[in-house]
């Protein structure tokens, strides 16, 4: 069995946003066992798994990314779409556009402290489209 759905996440400001619940609400009934693949259909955002308990982790990750890939670097050529655009593309490449998560007993088989994050790297990225593909039996 393969099922696929596409949905949009509400617009969010720049940062690392816990979206596990938002994604779960959009999924079909999950199979007993299988895989969930998630793809964010944008080049300036990413999906990640990380700690879902302490919000300081989200803040710290945002600060780390902003220091690793600063805005207004003099060597950027792609600058017409705003100061945050080229850094957003670079950060997206670093984190990645997709996740694959095992499904066990009809639930996502995540670690105790793991959550799914939308990494929004633009100040005004708008709504982000997600494709969810469920493969299972």
Image (spheres, rainbow, N blue to C red):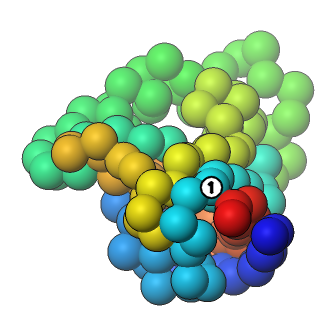
Residue placed at 46% from the left, 76% from the top?
24
Image check: 133 left or right of 61? right
Residue 58, image x, y percentages: 28, 45
Residue shown at the point (46%, 69%) measured from the top left: 106
The number of numbered badges drawn on the structure is 1
Please say whether residue 21 is visible from this viewpoint.
Answer: yes
Q: Tell me if residue 127 comes above or below residue 84 in the rendering.
A: below
Q: Position of residue 127 (x, y in %)?
A: 64, 77
Q: Is residue 112 above or below residue 3?
A: above
Q: Quadrant of the C terminus?
A: bottom right
Label 1: which secondary element: strand
Q: In the figure, 44 relative to 2: above or below?
A: above
Q: Is residue 124 visible?
A: no
Residue 42: horizontal and vertical position, in percent? 77, 56
Where residue 86 sits, quadrant-wise, is top right
Q: Nearer the viewer, residue 17 or 98?
A: 98
Q: Residue at x 53, y 66 (%)?
A: 32
Q: Is residue 131 left or right of residue 122?
A: right
For this rendering, which residue is in front, 103 or 73?
Answer: 103
Most foreground residue, 39 or 105: 105
Which residue corresponds to mark 1?
Answer: 34
Which quadrant would residue 31 be assigned to in this image? bottom right
Q: Quadrant of the N terminus?
A: bottom right
**Which image quarter: residue 77?**
top right
- Crowding at mark 1 (Cα within 10 Å: few <14, some 14-19, many 20+): many
Question: Whole-percent x and y of residue 61?
Answer: 34, 34
Q: Residue at x 81, y 39 (%)?
A: 79
């Amino acid at each position: 069995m393969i099922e696929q759905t596409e949905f949009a996440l509400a617009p969010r400001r720049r940062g690392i946003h816990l979206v596990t619940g938002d994604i779960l609400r959009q999924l079909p009934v999950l199979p007993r066992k299988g895989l969930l693949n998630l793809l964010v259909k944008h080049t300036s955002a990413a999906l990640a798994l990380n700690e879902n308990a302490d919000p300081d982790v989200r803040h710290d990750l945002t600060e780390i990314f902003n220091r690793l890939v600063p805005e207004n670097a003099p060597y950027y050529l792609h600058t017409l779409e705003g100061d945050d655009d080229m850094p957003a593309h670079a950060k997206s490449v670093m984190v990645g556009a997709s996740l694959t998560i095992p499904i066990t007993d009809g639930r996502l088989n995540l670690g105790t402290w793991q959550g799914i994050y939308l990494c929004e790297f633009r100040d005004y990225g708008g709504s982000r489209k997600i494709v969810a593909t469920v493969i299972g039996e």
